[in-house]
Image (tube, rainbow, N blue to C red):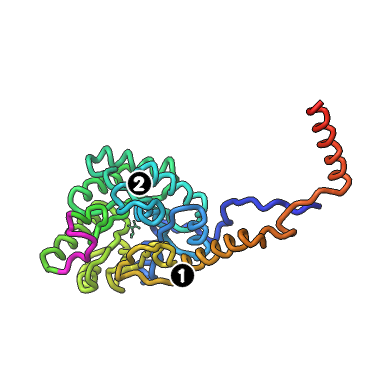
Amino acid sequence: MSARPKIATAPPAKGKPVTLSSLGEKKALGEPIAMVTAYDYPSAGVAEAAGVDVVLVGDSAAMTVLGYPSTVPVSVEEMLMLCAAVRRGLQTPLLVGDLPFGSYEVSDEQAVTTAQRFVKEAGCDAVKLERGGSSVDRARAIVAAGIPVMGHVGLTPQTATALGGYRSQGRTADRALEVAQDAIGLQQAGCFAIVFEAIPADLTDLLMPQLQVPVIGIGAGPATDGQVLVFHDLLGIYDGHAARFVKRYADVREQMIAGVRAFAEDVRARRYPEPEHGYTMAPDERERLRGLLEEAATSGSG
Ligand code: KIV
């Protein structure tokens, strides 16, 4: 019997799918929640195999995989394509899609319409949006439409210019109070979880007792219910500036460069391909082909 060809399909389910209630249970039990970003089928497979709880298709994709200078330019269509690819590689973690800048702020109707596309077209379990203020109303509207929403406060990259750049937030009592109000507002609007980005650990400590929903931190200290890092940052794939809160767990970019360089050197030195990388013809077929080619050449020239 011939060996079955390897077909790239989604990996088998690794466990019971993570749900909003299982995340709530983790918070209640004090079990930390692990969340990473992913942007395509292979990174989703890695997140699945590594056993994380939540996968976010972050609009950080704008920079990490699409090469934009910030998260602002990425479009809904680009995000949907990435979310759909991640969906195909994911069974167990909860899949959250980031609503990009300009796709939800205008009205509740715009927010609900965009969120529905992330669920219907890309298979997301939930969506994420940034900031308090009018985003609280948008979150409430999306939740009322039956779509789970994750909030995001502190450093909100979509509006980094208005915040004075990519810098930590809430270091004065006045600004910290605004961050606190944003978080409480999003919780009251029905968000199932909230991301705290780049805020002092003291602020997180003071805020945590007021939050009944899971809080996932990124540069917000150790007191949150979970932590998130950007896939390319934690694996060392992305070559840009890394924020203070990034911890590198691997240097995959160096390994990728070394691999591609070795391939290019082998090609130039004619060391690749070797016989085992090619296909052969039975000698009699080869001879028959030689004859056929000669015949075709003779008839063509006559
Ligand atoms: O876009 C993103 O990757 C994010 C995480 C940093 C939380 O919003």
Q: Amino acid at mark 2?
A: Ile
Magenta residue check for 10? no
Magenta residues span 162-171
Residue lying at 30% horizontally and 45% vertically, measured from the top left: 142
Where in the figure is residue 190, as x and y percent of width and height? 27, 52
Q: Main secondary structure of the magenta part?
A: loop
The quarter of the image that holds ligand 1 is bottom left
Where in the figure is residue 30, as x and y percent of width and height? 36, 71
Please tell me how crowded label 2 is: few (under 14), some (14-19), or many (20+) other residues with Cα within 10 Å.
Answer: many
Where in the figure is residue 206, as x and y percent of width and height? 20, 71
**How far separated are the C-alphas under marks 1 and 2?**
37 Å
Q: Which mark is residue 147?
A: 2
- Against 153, residue 245 (above or below) is below
Q: Quadrant of residue 64?
A: bottom left
The C terminus lies in which quarter of the figure?
top right
The residue carrying mark 1 has its beta carbon less than 8 Å from ligand 1: no
Residue 79 or residue 25, whichever sits in front: 79
Residue 22 appears anywhere in the view: no
Q: Which mark is residue 251?
A: 1
Q: Secondary structure at mark 1?
A: loop
Q: Which mark is residue 85?
A: none
Q: Amino acid at mark 1?
A: Asp
